[in-house]
Amino acid sequence: MMMATTRLLLGAALFAAPAIASAQTPPPPPPAEAKTTADAYVAGAGKSDLYEINSSQVVLQKSQNAGVKKFAQMMIDHHQKTTAATVKAAQKAGLNPPPPALDPGATASINELQAASPADIDRLYLGQQLPAHQAALDLHQSYASGGDKAPLKASAKAAVPIVKRHIAEATKLQGSASAAGM
């Protein structure tokens, strides 16, 4: 009887593992041309910022963890500023960028957060944040070094230390969450 229960639990765990892993899927990175082409960079940076703002707004409503909520508020504040800086730089470069828009992957990631229980929200959010910020860091660093418009290259370069700080904070929070058993 105990062996059958163990097999049943093991089977359930193996069946659930892919669902748990997929529930932490961050939005996809921007396309390769976003690393060198102004219009694509502006769209990619805008999508990234919008995802960070919207996902963090969900977490502010659902999380019970003061540290995670503080991080989420920082994401909203910083990404609103980086969006404004990118738009200003784009206009200085002679572009008229449309408002940022989410792609289906970013929308799905936000939907996962909205559907998450309060007990799972912090783990899920932090699990999305690190890869999303790594993709943003790659985008900003790449455009800063190889982009085609000087004002946007400067804006991308200014975003790099901000994104690095976010990665450090998210890593620290994720470590704290793991230690706390989240």
Image (cartoon, helix red, strand yellow):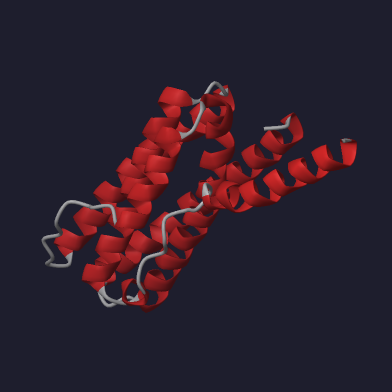
Q: In the rendered view, would you say 150 is above or below 137?
A: below
Q: Position of residue 117 (x, y in %)?
A: 51, 28
Q: In the rendered view, would you say 101 is above or below 148?
A: above
Q: Position of residue 123 (x, y in %)?
A: 59, 38
Q: Who is closer to the viewer here, 93 or 126?
A: 126
Q: In the rendered view, would you say 158 is above or below 82?
A: below
Query: From the viewer's perspective, is 69 left or right of 91?
Result: right
Is residue 73 shown to the viewer in this render? no
Query: From the viewer's perspective, is 136 left or right of 92?
Result: right
Is residue 30 shown to the viewer in this render? yes
Q: Quadrant of the C terminus?
A: top right
Q: Quadrant of the N terminus?
A: top right
Count all numbered tags in the image, as a single digit. 0
In the orientation shown, which residue stands out farthest toward the front?
A: 1
Q: Position of residue 145 (x, y in %)?
A: 41, 75
Seen at 51% across and 40% down, the residue is 125
Q: Position of residue 64 (x, y in %)?
A: 54, 21
Seen at 37% across and 78% down, the residue is 146
Q: Who is closer to the viewer here, 10 or 19?
A: 10
Query: From the viewer's perspective, is 115 left or right of 173?
Result: left
Seen at 43% across and 27% down, the residue is 60
Query: From the viewer's perspective, is 100 left or right of 66?
Result: left
The quadrant in which residue 73 appears is: top left
Q: Who is closer to the viewer here, 24 or 54?
A: 24
Seen at 60% across and 53% down, the residue is 18
